[in-house]
Amino acid sequence: MATSESPGDTTSGDGTNDGNYYVLNDGNKLPKVGLGVYRADPGKETYRSVQWALKVGYRLIDTAAMYGNEHDVGQAILDSGIPRTEIFITTKLNTDSHGYHTALQAANECLAKLQTTYIDLLLIHSPYGEKIVETWDALLALQKEGKAKSIGVSNFGIPHLEALREHHRPMPAVNQFEMHPLIFKSRHELIEYCQQHQILITAYGSLFSGERNRFRDPFLQELAQKYSKTVPQILLRWALDNGFAVIPKSTSSKERLEENWNVLDFSLSNEEVRQISQMPGEPLDEYWDPVNNAEVDLGDLDLSKDTHHWG
């Protein structure tokens, strides 16, 4: 059973219970369901999608410097009239922003584009940018300054996470990577590692990474009928029942946003979760897969020695 220090728990530090949030290993709360704006065109499309999402009830918006739409996310949040403290913003550093001083500068640029004084969750987007421990030290410094409330990583495999642990750095609050039933078995060791070290998994690509032909699976269709839900809702619920946060992207319609949001009012049985997890999948060779393919490059471990003491 999860404790108040464990990702997956929904009990806040004051003893209240809110089933819409996970408690991170740093004590902060992250909404279970958010809007991802990956591939949302900068400008009107991103702005409109964020506005729609906030009206539906979303309070987590997930963007990245690489997406080029941070300004539109920030403007939509400002224009929503919802207090900034009620909205959880995740963004990620570009791979060309790795390195201690470069990461500090890049984070300040993210803050300016988002038009906010702090980021709720700042991630290293990928280990492909190298210098992962050096860059992590920059995120720790940003957290100490209050510019990032929580810090984490994305697309990190076990060797990348082990590099942080072996050099006595605090572990990430979150690891965000592609996760759906077709690749569940191939990433089971990574899932277990994250859970062991109280790192919350945020799943992207939850709807079979857009392979909608997979929605015709008979068992998924059966479950959708049983729960009066759609197959995408069953897949999102599967992720939640595994203890993952989800950030499905939807920019096409408010109705799709509402569909993705309405997954908090039911649960699958343990056996149903297990059966979905056993779906036959395919290797991720054709995907962008730094979890398995990126080398471990530490960078300069001494750049932050004047401000931090590790070990």
Image (cartoon, rainbow, N blue to C red):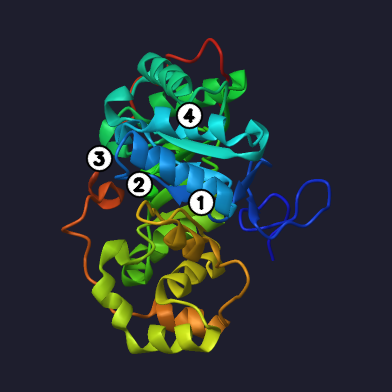
Q: Nearer the viewer, mark 2 or mark 3?
A: 2
Residue underneath mark 4? 75
Residue 302 x/y as whole percent? 43, 16
Q: Are marks 4 and 1 in contact (CB under 8 Å)?
A: no
Q: Are marks 1 and 3 in contact (CB under 8 Å)?
A: no
Locate the N terminus by quadrant. Answer: bottom right
Q: Which mark is residue 261?
A: none
Q: Earlier in the sequence, mark 2 or mark 3?
A: 2
Residue 215 location, quadrant = bottom left
Crowd around label 2: few <14 · some 14–19 · many ≥20 (10 Å): many
Disc 4 from disc 1: Cα separation: 18 Å
Q: Earlier in the sequence, mark 4 or mark 2?
A: 4
Give the residue at x 38% y 20%. Answer: 106
SS under mark 3: loop
Residue 160 location, quadrant = top left
Three-letter amino acid code at the position of disc 4: Gln
Q: Nearer the viewer, mark 3 or mark 4?
A: 4
Three-letter amino acid code at the position of disc 2: Asn
Q: Which mark is residue 295?
A: 3
Q: Earlier in the sequence, mark 1 or mark 3?
A: 1
Residue underneath mark 1? 34
Q: Nearer the viewer, residue 199 or 248?
A: 248
SS under mark 2: loop
Crowd around label 4: few <14 · some 14–19 · many ≥20 (10 Å): some
Residue underneath mark 2? 155
